[in-house]
Image (tube, rainbow, N blue to C red):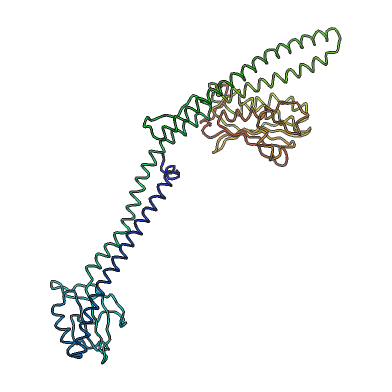
Amino acid sequence: MRTGQLLRTQAFRIVLVYVMLFAFSVAALLGFTYWNTRRTLDGQTDQIIEADATGLAEQYQHLGIQGLAETVRSRALHAGQALYLLSDGQRRATLAGNLDSWPQIAIAPGDYVEFYYERPVDGKLETRRARGRIFPLQGDFILLVAQDVHDRYLTERMFTTTLPWTVGLILLLGLGGGALMSRNMLRRVDAINRTSGEIIAGDLTRRVPVSGSGDEFDTLAENLNRMLDRIERLMKGLREVTDSVAHDLRTPLNRLRNRLEESAARLTAQGADAGEIERAMAETDQLIGTFNALLLIAETDAGTTRAAMTALDLSSVAADVAELYEPLAEERDITLVLLPGSAAIEGNRSLIAQALANLVDNAIKYTPPGGQVSIAVSAGEAGADLTVRDSGPGIAAADKPRVVERFVRLEASRNSPGTGLGLSLVAAVAHFHQAELVLEDNVPSGLKATLRFPRRALRTPPLKNAAE
């Protein structure tokens, strides 16, 4: 299966949604863990700062600014992670502390701030991060008490850098695993679709393959196969009954017509009126035509004529049909035009000629005297079109889906001869060739009927003559 087809499948979309939800859940969980851990660590650091500042405040109350400065100097000698800085209110004179100068922070007494400072490590200055609090003192003095949090800061930065990569890897691995799982399932679905397509094309003997794993796809395949067995038996029985009835009735009808013809010939030879017998013969011809059409539709739907598929030129078929119907068109004062154009396809010449003849016969039948019927053949990127246009009354939009059904006749054609099977046969021939019968309004008036053959039916290069 192609990548584009895989991405459009429902199975892959389900996997994609699941992976995205999982990645979002992981990101939210890790984000909450990060936020809660940082809040806890900040709270611990703040408690240390508060305890340190409380002790210095007691020294300041008992010993004053000089005693506080001595205490800060003493603590700065063994500070560890603690940082101190005591200066005047203008931060110009440093009285005591282990910071060389005030960091680049705004003075906001009472608030906790984070800042960068420099301190020598192995003979080199290293920029580190600290968290502290500023305490204003009487006499316009300022005390900064802080803790070095650089190691924790590096851990946090590594965590925040790793988090997007973690989510990205979850998405990537999840999508990869989902694609593999989807591809495995879709192979089974494709097998069912291919079998269904072959059955729709007319091969009722096809069955869905069973892998033997006993999973839900095997259960579905077994149920479908049992259903197809039942349908095939019913269709076979129906076809046998239809064929038997049609053959059994067509034979006596042919005999009846022959006898009527013989009777009409005898009466005519004796000078008697044979009009009633001739009308009975016409009715018999119509019944025989109906049974012939039903048998041809049944054979086409069953695919029994598929062996007659050959390479043919549609323009040759159109020329033959136009020549056949030209006398009828002249008799009814209708102009029958064959437009130039050609397209070579793979198809059944007899069926396509019969379908085109039905379209032309309908067009001539419903086109008023002085009108025009045209036949056109064209080939394009989408496939080949065999089109018949007329200047008759056309078909209403609401009736176009109905006219291809068997024995359906519109009110406007009730009084004209016909069986209601003409367009049904055309639709069956189109289905047999995997083509499409398109009924559209002709401009300015009339009907435009098109047999649209798919591109896969085209032959390259086009044939010069289908009879060669």
Residue placed most toward the observer, 341 or 318: 318
Rendered residue at 73%/36% (across/down): 391
In the image, residue 262 sits, relative to residue 56, either above or below, namely above
Left or right side of 379 for 35: left
Residue at 29% in and 79% down: 105
Q: Is residue 31 above or below residue 417?
A: below
Vertical arrangement, residue 44 with respect to residue 65, above or below? above
Residue 327 as seen in the image, left or right of residue 340: right
Given residues 426 and 174, the one toward you in this image is 174
User: Which residue reaches farthest bottom?
Assistant: 139
Q: Total label count?
A: 0
Task: Specify whether 432 is left or right of 77.
Answer: right
Which residue appears at 35% of the width and 58% of the height? Answer: 27
**Quadrant of the drawing holding the N terminus:** top left
Residue 291, image quadrant:
top right
The picture places residue 146, in percent across and down from the top left corner, at 23, 77
Q: Quadrant of the C terminus?
A: top right
Residue, x 71% and y 39% (percent of image)?
A: 396
- Comparing 449 with 66, the one in front is 66
Q: Position of residue 161 (x, y in %)?
A: 29, 61
Residue 293: give x, y in percent of width and height. 65, 23
